[in-house]
Image (tube, rainbow, N blue to C red):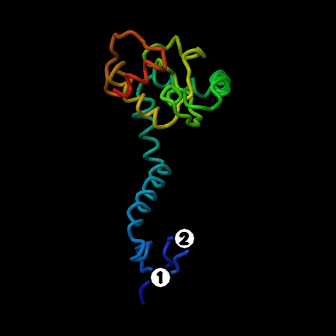
Amino acid sequence: MPRVRRCRQLGCHAMVTFPDHYCQQHYEHEAEYLASRQRWARSNDKQYTHKYNTVIRYRNEDKRQQYNFYRTRQWSHLRQRVLERDHYLCAYCKVQGTIMPAKTVDHIVPIEFDETLKASVDNLAVICGSCHRAKTDWEQSYYGTGQGNELQSVTPINDVSSIVVLMNN
């Protein structure tokens, strides 16, 4: 007799044969569920985490020092000051006329480009996840930050509204 289990869809009591997790009626959720399980397994895999930390994150001594700054008491106090100053709202969305809650504090001019600004409150802004991804992509093309890129000799832009205009183009 084949092994069976209940469908993972809330409220559905249909029985499903192994290795499936959803019945025929809710089968469209199967791929999404399997992908989420793979993401979870990858994040809890010591070998993957070790490779990420040693090869990507801490690829050289400069990057190691940059990331160690985020573990200091100075950074936690700076971060809290900026969050309270901006009322936990994304500064980049605010320029575009929307209000989006956020908890990430970002350097307006990346510290990889100008390390002297890493502890300056004026160089910090609260940013949401979608703006942070767009800004990171823009920084990689404008400043040349990120792995495999070479830093450009450009003038730093420290105005959030100007960055939003350039990000969206």
Occupied quadrant, residue 85:
top right
Q: Left or right: 75 with respect to 35?
A: right
Among the two numbered marks 1 and 2 on one chain, the one whose residue lies closer to the N terminus? 2
Amino acid type of disc 2? Answer: Leu
- Count numbered badges in the picture: 2
Residue nearer the viewer, 157 or 96? 96
Q: Which residue is mark 2?
A: 10
Residue 74, given in percent of the width and then of the height, sits at: 65, 21
The residue that label 1 is drawn on is 15
Residue 137: x and y, percent? Answer: 37, 29
Secondary-structure class at tag 2: loop
Which image quarter is the C terminus in?
Answer: top left
Indicate the position of residue 103 as horizontal and vertical percent values.
59, 35
Q: Amino acid at mark 1?
A: Met
Q: Which is nearer the eye, 115 or 63?
A: 115
Residue at image point 39% right, 77% down: 24
What residue is shown at x 53% (from left), y 13% (from top)? 117
